[in-house]
Image (spheres, grey):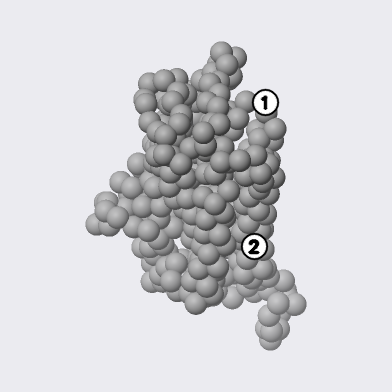
Amino acid sequence: MQGGGFLVSKNFEAKAPSASEMNVISIIFGFGLAVAMFTAATAGQQTLDARRRGKMFTTYTIMIWAEWISAMCIGLITYMWLSGAIKARLVFLSSVLLFFWTISLQCILQIIINRISVLMVRKNAVRLKIIVCLLTLVINISAFLVWLPALLQINKTWIIINVHWDRAEKACFLVMDGGLNAYFIYLVRTKLIANGLQKYNRLFYFNISMSMLSLSLDCILIGSIFLPGPYVNVQFYTLTYLLKLYIEMNITILIGKIVKSTTTISFGASKAAPVSGTNDYQLNIMARRNGRMRLPDEELAKDNSTFTVEERITKTVDTDITHD
């Protein structure tokens, strides 16, 4: 590895990772490559599905590939730099890493919002995207203002500030991640399940488990800051965000499958007006919906109703009233 150069402190000390640290870094990097293969396969399948419908580029596919490329570039560049495979000035290298980190952080949050927006009014969804984007941008800018001077060892004050801000920044992202997932769970419960669409129970409980896993990954990333070596954390970042991307794509796939399915919802007598001459009756509602949603990028079953991310979920309901 190589340090020094433009803007670097005269007292800069380049600390190469020890042999044991490189072993740990290599193991984590290997796990990251394995996860990257599965993630790329899933992203490739969703991209091909979009292409078959004549949509080579969609917002969703662009974001998942931008997230994948950014996470991989962070892992590859740092690993090759630490192993001495590439030579680069510290200022240039850190700027490149911050650029990919900014893209990665923005994309993973917008991917989450993309599925939330399915259950929101378009105006509210756009507002949520802008608010989260601006909050994330503040975190990104703070990294340039704090992490870069600390990395260049301008003075000890920046180094101390960076230690505390690094933990606070990751905690802020954990809160944002948890808040967005909790909001999606709330919308599924109140807008779908509460209205009789019981098939979304599967999505409800699956998203709870995946949210817990995603938050656990955030906690692991925060915990990696306390490891003795300062370089292990970067490889943990690559592994963590590739796993989070894989989780998001699987949630998207599940949404597509559930939306294409047909659900029969039964209500008791208290849910409808009495029918003359009968004591018991059953109201069978066949809720069928289809269309193209930008989120899953899958072709849904043909029907009379459509829904998009822009227009919320609309449905066609066929009602058959039978009585015994």
Q: Residue furthest bottom?
A: 276
Compute the Cα span from label 1 to label 2.
Answer: 36 Å
User: Which residue is at the front of the view, 91 or 38?
Assistant: 91
Left or right side of 134 for 65 = left
Residue visible at 75% across and 77% down in the picture = 270
Left or right side of 12 for 279 = right
Residue visible at 59% across and 75% down in the picture = 321
Element at badge 1? Answer: loop
The quarter holding residue 38 reads top left
Q: Amino acid at mark 1?
A: Pro
Residue 323: x, y in percent?
64, 74
Residue visible at 49% across and 29% down in the picture = 32
Q: Is residue 99 visible?
A: yes
Residue 124: x, y in percent?
54, 75
Residue that badge 1 annotates:
228
User: Which disc is residue 183 wearing?
Assistant: 2
Work out whether 318 lies above or below 229.
Answer: below
Is the residue marked by circle 1 packed among few (<14), some (14-19), or many (20+) residues within 10 Å?
few
Element at badge 2? Answer: helix
Residue 286: x, y in percent?
53, 67
Work out whether 71 lies above or below 33.
Answer: below
Locate the N terminus by quadrant: top left
Q: Amino acid at mark 2?
A: Tyr
User: Which disc is residue 149 wearing?
Assistant: none
